[in-house]
Image (tube, rainbow, N blue to C red):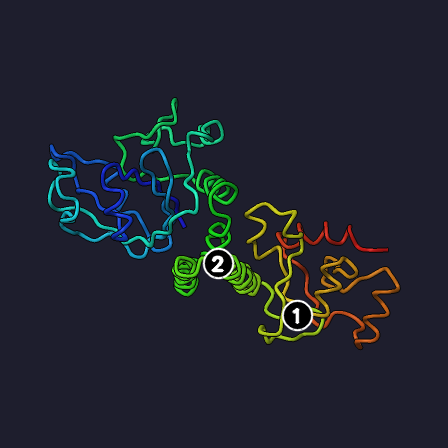
Amino acid sequence: MAFWWVNHKQTYRQETDGGYVWSPKTKANGALNISYDNLTRCHTGDVVFSYANGLISQIGLVEAAAVTAQKPPEFGSAGENWSQEGWLVRVNWQPLKQPLVPQTFFELLQPLLPERHSPISTTTGRGNQGVYLAGLSESLGQLLLQLIEEHSDPALRVHLMVLEEEGAYTAALLDDMQRLREVPSSTERDALTKARLGQGLFRHRVSKLEPACRVTGLARQEFLVASHIKPWRSCDNSERLSGANGLLLSPHVDKLFDRHWISFDTGGELIWHHEAAGEALRCWGIQGANLIRPFGRAQESFMGAHRDALRR
């Protein structure tokens, strides 16, 4: 997933209403323009921030790679000097509840802006009219998502977090964004959030490393819980989605693991200290781990801290 920033200038309404971004292939004098070429670098699932009139008012997901297309007729007199042939990228736009004003947060954004072809001035924070579509670093893209979550639309952040390059996850996210547009109630947003968090990218990544419950041996994933090793509330964004930061556990086992009543040693053996945990395990007929295997290095970096917090 890549991040892009589009400066719509005078075509904001036409492009967001039409579900696309469009640019000529070259400048009026035939010279190449990297911010036009950037349309050809867009991939399905990329995130695009829509900027016009000093505001980020919409956020979108690329639906398909760029294709050659004629200048949209709805542009009218806008861009009279542009070539009639250009690049078109389909984008699923989602309006924000409240627009984000990047200049308000310029001190945070400035260190992360690209040195060349920045979408806004690196000295003033105002829009750079010479740049149409600008590529952003992951750090800047994540920061913008965080600012949108905190100041504009708390629902969008969660849905973008479960984006996966595989088509199933992209399709699910696009479907969610459409449903949010059609049914913008807080209840619906909360339901979608829980569904995506419970069944989305995190579970997918965990299952690649942990295909079954280590304690019960159960491999039917519809009955397992994707449990964070390092608690969600304590994680940064990358840790929250890291497959190494999770285990697939049977629900009753997850309850003990989540509350640090049980853990696993470096070799994968089940461990506990408190008698209350031992009593629960005996009642369930559990004497130890069913699937014993060492943790990978990345998994162990999370498991070590979990082990240290084991209840005594």
1 vs 2, front mark: 2
Crowding at dot 2, Cα within 10 Å, few <14 / some 14-19 / many 20+, comes out as: few
Q: Residue at x 79, y 55 (%)?
A: 310
Q: Note whether 266 is above or below 288 in the view shown.
A: above
Asked which quadrant contains residue 134, the reply is: top left
Q: Determine the secondary structure under disc 1.
A: loop
Q: Give the position of the C terminus as an image quadrant.
A: bottom right
In percent of width and height, residue 77 lies at 12, 39
Asked which quadrant contains residue 170, the reply is: bottom left
Asked which quadrant contains residue 197, the reply is: bottom right
The residue type indicated by label 1 comes to Cys
Q: Determine the secondary structure under disc 2.
A: loop
Crowding at dot 1, Cα within 10 Å, few <14 / some 14-19 / many 20+, comes out as: many
Asked if residue 3 lies left or right of residue 22, the reply is: right
Which residue does the numbered mark 2 point to in the structure image? 185
In percent of width and height, residue 299 lies at 64, 55
Which residue does the numbered mark 1 point to in the structure image? 213
